Image: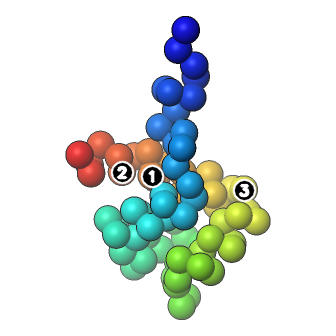
Amino acid sequence: MESNNSKNPLHGITLQKMLEQLVAFYGFDTLGELIKIKCFNENPSIKSSLTFLRKTDWARKKVEELYIKMLPKMK
């Protein structure tokens, strides 16, 4: 029997890996335009963004949604 995790595109992907791929694909400038949060627009870094996203569920959800939309474009 197939589990639901195999159908989840985020299964096995860490927040850090997700963010690194988004930054590599879009860059912080475009990422800051797509998701309007301070950690992407003012002195952005992976470390500061991870700190914020781990504490803020709504922002993490937006990053996850953008990551899922980006996946087909990367292939």
Q: Is residue 6 left or right of residue 49?
A: left
In this rendering, the answer to whether 9 lies above or below 40 is: above
- Secondary element under disc 1, as helix, strand or loop, is helix
Give percent across and percent down for residue 64. 54, 51
> At 52% across and 32% down in the image, what residue appears?
8
Q: Is residue 55 left or right of residue 43?
A: right
Contact between labelled residues 3 and 1, with CB atoms less than 8 Å apart: no
Contact between labelled residues 3 and 2, with CB atoms less than 8 Å apart: no
Kind of residue at badge 1: Tyr
Residue 67, numbered circle: 1
Give percent across and percent down for residue 51. 68, 73
Residue 39 seen anywhere in this rendered image of the structure? no
Give percent across and percent down for residue 32. 47, 74
Residue 57, numbered circle: 3
In this rendering, the answer to whether 4 lies above or below 25 is: above
> At 58% across and 22% down in the image, what residue appears?
4
Residue identified by numbered label 2: 70
**Around disc 3, counting alpha carbons within 10 Å, would you say few (fewer than 14), some (14 to 19), or many (20 or more)?**
few
- Secondary element under disc 2, as helix, strand or loop, is helix
Give percent across and percent down for residue 33. 44, 71
Which residue occupies the foreground of this view, 28 or 50?
50
Q: Quadrant of the N terminus?
A: top right
The answer for how far apart the CA atoms under marks 2 and 3 are is 20 Å
